[in-house]
Image (spheres, rainbow, N blue to C red):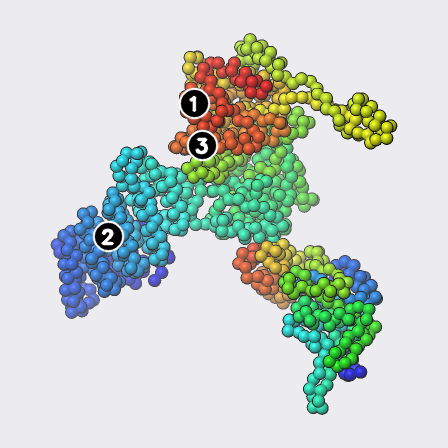
Amino acid sequence: MEITTISDGQARSPHLNPLEEQPANRLSPQAGKSLVIPRAGERESESLREIQVNEFEIYWQQLDCGFPRVGEVFADCMQDALVKLSGEGVSAYIEYARFLGKMGRGAEPILIFLEEWPGIARKSGEDALPAIAECIRRMYKSPNGKAITPFLQSLPSVVRRLPARQQLQEYLNLILDLMERTTGSIHGIHQTFASPGLPSLFKQIAVLLGQLSLAGLKNWVDYGVRYYNDHPERQIDYFSLQSADSRAVLQRERHGTLLMDNERKLDMYLRGLWQDEDLLIPYSSMFDELRQPVPYYDNLGIRLPDVYNDMNGVSGIDRYRATLAHMVGHRRWSTKIFADNFSPFQRMAAECLEDSRVEYLAMREYPGLRRLFLALHPAPAEDACDPERESGVRHRLTMLSRAILDPQHTYKNAHVIEFAQRFHALMQEGDMNTQEIASLAVSFVARTRRQSDQLARTHFKDTVVSYRDDNRQMWHFIEEDDEGEVADQHRKMEPGKEIEGLPPRHYPEWDYNNQSYRPDWVSVYENLHPKGNAADIDRLLVKHASLAKRLKKMLDLIKPQDKVRIRYQEEGSELDLDVALRSLIDFKGGSSPDPRINMSHKTSGRNIAVTVLLDLSESLNEKAAGSEQTILELSQEAVSLLAWAIEKLGDPFAIAGFHSNTRHDVRYMHIKGFSEKWDDEVKGRLAAMEASYSTRMGAAMRHASHYLEKQQADKKLMLILTDGEPADIDSKDGRILIEDARRAVAELDQEGIYAYCINLDPKADEYVKDIFGKQYTIIDKVADLPAKLPQLFISLTK
Amino acid sequence: MGGNMTDKDQYKIHQEPFYQAQGNEVTLYEAAYAARLPVMVKGPTGCGKSRFIEYMAWKLNKPLITVACNEDMTASDLVGRYLLDANGTRWLDGPLTTAARIGAICYLDEIVEARQDTTVVIHPLTDHRRTLPLDKKGELIQAHPDFQLVISYNPGYQSLLKDLKQSTKQRFTALDFDYPTSKLETEILSKETGMDADICAKLVKIGVAARNLKGHGLDEGVSTRLLVYAATLIKSGVEPRDACRMAMVRPITDDADIRDTLDHAIDAVFA
Ligand SMILES: Nc1ncnc2c1ncn2[C@@H]1O[C@H](COP(=O)(O)OP(=O)(O)OP(=O)(O)O)[C@@H](O)[C@H]1O
Ligand SMILES: [Mg+2]
């Protein structure tokens, strides 16, 4: 008898097969006191019924149970049992029911058992009883007696999903393990509590087993125990599938095509069909439904979601292939172009058309890809976006992309039609390159521009193409470039509208509990800080004119002395006369001369690159103790002075601010890039600085190091200005983010970056040392910050 | 002289076989033949080695005797043996002996398959002596001036144990063969089978995908021969995907992941 087809929600309904349909109305309201004899009219012979009645009577006595409700259903149950159980099985059935009836947990356990056991035994075997009984015994002996009823109620669904004895045993072990780990003292109070999560789990087990394999369930349970062991309410939320992460872990563990299981196949796909190879690195796609991480590749490998479900008739494995084909397309045919000359919308458009181009070329290699792309690419309805109320850029671009892909599209939009045609015409002429595609994109943006594109609300529906990567490989940023000549090019980015445009970068976070990284845990979105009034900053500098004067003197002392001579160069800028003469003498004297007769010059000393990383979390809006100004205002002054000072010294430096609103949304705001001058543009951004949200420090540091690392300097310094400890609203365990930041400092150290913290929290002693070791200063009189910060920098770098 | 006079003509190739040259192998072979140097043709299975020799024999207008070697083969199978008949015993030349007598090109296909002791009998034929001793018969044959020895050798999949002895290898000049470039292979397929070039190009594409997996789960890629089979099946009306699976995937592997990948390649190519 098979048990595969029915999807069940309720815990009780062991009868799947209509053929074994048994009396349905178990808890009938009939008010029989002791034993209800099978109803008249059933087609049994009188004599058989008599035998049964006698038999039932004996069992009833053995059961020795006084609950009236049990009496009501006993006859039905026995009929069922006699059909489904062996003789021995029936004895064990009565005997164990009797135990449950006397356990002191009311009528429910025995009722459920009587009703459900025959069906369960049919599926799992009668010999499953001892293991189940043992499980109940353990609950009974611990403070978990309350869980027995839900446990029994859940059993039919459990055996339906886990019919093999071995599986059932593993399940029971899992339950016992969960129970043991979650029962006990909470917050050190030595008193035993029942496992908060256990009964909730039983109520959800049908749903869970509907989606998870046993292994998946185990992981899901483990996660809940690990993270919520000390927190009864959260634990209940988790195990009753109420909390977001609980659903997210479920998502992660659920069925689908796992990358893990298909790596070899996908390696073969890359190698066989594309002659490409790379490490395939999974990221977890479990959490957030809104901001799903996007595939990408970098020099470590190709990043793909850990699981793909089938979608629109495309199997998970083919979705992986489509995604790989797309990325291979970029790897073959895309070249990096400079991002700095494009507005965010232009960039979006360029990315979108470049995606279409590489797919066009990929489909030319393998026409079968078209079926996959067509099935997976959304086809947004033409009128879905209300251009009065939302920004339609994504919507338009997705329509264009669809139109390019799908000759059968039904769009009427003249621009979409025209540009799809232009795209194909151009591709027919030659394959185009990324730069040419970008020009086409720019003219599309120009042609379709609308006032409402600037609206904060972007139309998102049906605009995500799940098999496309985030195109991070398509762009050069002047920022990242060490060549001087491009650095002067003016940045044309429109500040503030970046957030939708740039894909997030994912960073790991350190989980000290497990001593392991949670991979790709944090999403960092970067943007240019919005611009305010540069004159405000100039006013601040004027205000601190006398301080600036003092600083100037200190700066002059450490400013690099002009030129140093390097001698003994085979090739250099000029002849080193001394050495040359000596060589000549050697030569005349018959011995071999030293050819290193030139010298050259270089500017000495300072070769330091600095990133100033500003915590811009909500708490900066508070007034500083003993001052009329907020911490934010003081920081602004301090950073302005610092920037002025560093500029004087000529060290390359960058300024960025950060805050976070859960791990899904860490904002990293560029205020000054390494290649930018300390000019009005930058001052404007600094002037507009605002504080909100929380402080996920580790992620911000990792991201800052991503840029600082690329600087060519002997010494790299990251100054972190903060007013408190790392924290975020989704991180309850305060220790986690502290430990993560500490880890980040260690990572920076590995990369040759010296992290130094300027902390404005008088109570920082408790944690700052843990993170930064000795590399920190606490400034407890925040009002002094504008004077202290530049001085500190000077003394750090002299 | 023992044996019957053999009719040379039956070993001649009368119709020009289709052979698509991949490089200058034709000229090189002609030069080797002119000097009667033994030739070894190396390359993976089904890449056109046999076809090439056939073509050369036709071009040089020489008889060709081909021996497919196998592990059960003994020296007598090559050289000849006494057979019993009504009047006692009768000597019967083996194919190698026949070739040496009539001045044929003797092509020993997959020589490594034969046992080591078998291979040594060819040694005296390959050096300046150009002789073949028939020990059992007590005869020493001087090879006909037109005689040439050619062996084929697939370096890819043989085990180390079966490798040719250095002393054998060092007696041959060698021509390296490999699967042709996609363009050439497409031409070969369509000329060989009359299938249109578009389909042939697709078959080649799938073949290339399989060859890319060589060493990553596959010992040998799909041979040109198998591509020819697939094209032939399609030509005779079989659905292209089925033909590919039957002729190009199923024969070469039982590895599920590879099958799946190649099946996908077939779908990707035949949209
Ligand atoms: N260059 C070529 N010109 C014409 N046909 C070719 C060529 N290469 C391969 N073929 C085709 O491939 C088939 C197999 O080639 P052939 O039998 O010569 O392979 P082989 O290298 O001798 O293989 P093996 O090592 O298994 O004996 C031929 O029958 C022919 O159809
Ligand atoms: Mg892309």
Q: CA distance from mark 2 to mark 1?
A: 58 Å
Q: Is there a contact, CB below 8 Å, between mark 3 and mark 1?
A: no
Give the mark toward the camera: 2 or 1.
1
State the image coordinates of residue A94 (x, y, percent, origin top left): 20, 58
State whether label 3 is within 8 Å of ligand 2. no
Secondary-structure class at tag 3: helix
State the image coordinates of residue A82 (x, y, percent, origin top left): 23, 63
State the image coordinates of residue B86 (x, y, percent, origin top left): 69, 90
**Marks 3 and 2 share the same chain:** yes
State the image coordinates of residue A252 (x, y, percent, origin top left): 44, 44
Q: CA distance from mark 3 to mark 2?
A: 49 Å
Q: Which residue is mark 1?
A: A764
Quadrant that contains the N terminus of chain A: bottom left
**Marks 2 and 1 share the same chain:** yes
Q: Give the total number of marks visible in the rendering.
A: 3
Provide the chain ID for the residue under circle 2. A
Residue A582 vs residue A141, the one in the foreground: A582
Q: CA distance from mark 3 to mark 1?
A: 15 Å
Residue A460 visible in the current orientation: no
Tag 2: residue type?
A: Ile
Secondary-structure class at tag 1: helix
Q: Earlier in the sequence, mark 3 or mark 2?
A: 2
Q: Which residue is mark 3?
A: A739
Q: Which residue is mark 2?
A: A112
Residue A566 vs residue A84, the one in the foreground: A566
Identify the residue at image location x=51%, y=15%.
A788
Tag 1: residue type?
A: Ala
Tag 3: residue type?
A: Glu
Provide the chain ID for the residue under circle 1. A
Is residue A166 found left or right of A140 in the rendered image?
A: right
State whether label 1 is within 8 Å of ligand 2. no
Judge the density around disc 2: few (<14), some (14-19), many (≥20) Cα neighbours within 10 Å: many
